[in-house]
Image (cartoon, rainbow, N blue to C red):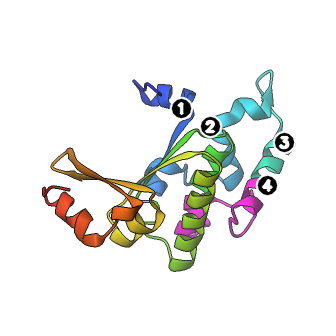
Amino acid sequence: TLRVTSPQGAIRQGIYLVPEDRRLSGLIIDFNIRENISLPGLDRYSTAGLINSAKETLAAKEACLSINIKPPLPEMKAANLSGGNQQKVVLAKWLALSPKVLIFDEPTRGIDVGAKSEIYTLIRKLAGEGVSVIAISSEMEEVLGISDRIAVMHEGRITGVLERMQFSEEAVMRLATGGEG
């Protein structure tokens, strides 16, 4: 059981957020890929306060290749990437810290179909590796496609939890409108 009382406490416990608005809340848009990926874990790339840029660059290159950031150029500004690749950079910065829990808020909002498929594959892979994944989405197809379990809310409270065998658009909509499970 994890007990979280603050964002810093969540981060210390390995709980990370991939936010809905990646440009505003997930990235420093004027930083490059390398800087964005290394920022949350700078202590991993520094000794006595000095950043080992070779180590930092190597980690960024490995991240670019492992989750297919295009182009795989650590010095490219995040602002120049597509929405899907920006989302991958946000994910890469947390993957570098070995997450226990990843919370995805609208994981594929504003990205193209190909990038959506890649994000879904990454989410499934992470879950298969034992990372707990919480996905918050308003897209029914996304919810039904990537979830093992769905908690549905109506007016700020959970109205039901569906297991995979119970999944249907009708069941989700019934709970989302305040109906019984």
Residue type at mark 4 is Glu
Q: Earlier in the sequence, mark 3 or mark 2?
A: 2
Mark drawn on residue 55: 3
**What is the distance, in whole Å, between disc 2 and disc 1 at their CAs?**
9 Å
Residue at the farthest front position: 165
Q: Rounded to the nearest whole Å, what is the CA distance between mark 3 and mark 2?
A: 15 Å
Q: Which mark is residue 11?
A: 1
**In front of the other: label 3 or label 4?**
4
Q: Which residues are magenta?
A: 61-87
Horizontal side of 50 relative to 152 (left or right) equals right
Task: Please name the residue that numbered disc 2 is placed on.
Answer: 40
* Gap in angstroms between the C-alphas marked 4 and 1: 23 Å
Q: State the image coordinates of residue 77 (x, y, percent, origin top left).
A: 64, 59
Whichever of callouts 3 and 1 sits on the residue coming sooner in the sequence is 1
Residue 174 image-quadrant placement: bottom left
- Residue 52 lies, with reference to residue 115, above or below; the image says above
Instruction: Find out whether the residues at labels 2 and 4 contact each other: C-beta distance under 8 Å.
Output: no
User: Disc 2 or 4, which lies upstream in sequence?
Assistant: 2
- Residue extending furthest right? 54
Provide the secondary structure element on which disc 1 rests.
Answer: helix
Magenta residue check for 20: no
Q: Is residue 29 above or below residue 156?
A: below
Q: Which disc number belongs to residue 109? A: none
Q: Could you say which disc has been placed on residue 62 in the image?
A: 4
Is residue 30 in view? no
Q: Decide: few, some or many residues near mark 3? Use Cα within 10 Å; few <14, some 14-19, many ≥20.
A: some
Local packing at callout 4 (Cα closer than 10 Å; few below 14, some 14-19, many 20+) is some
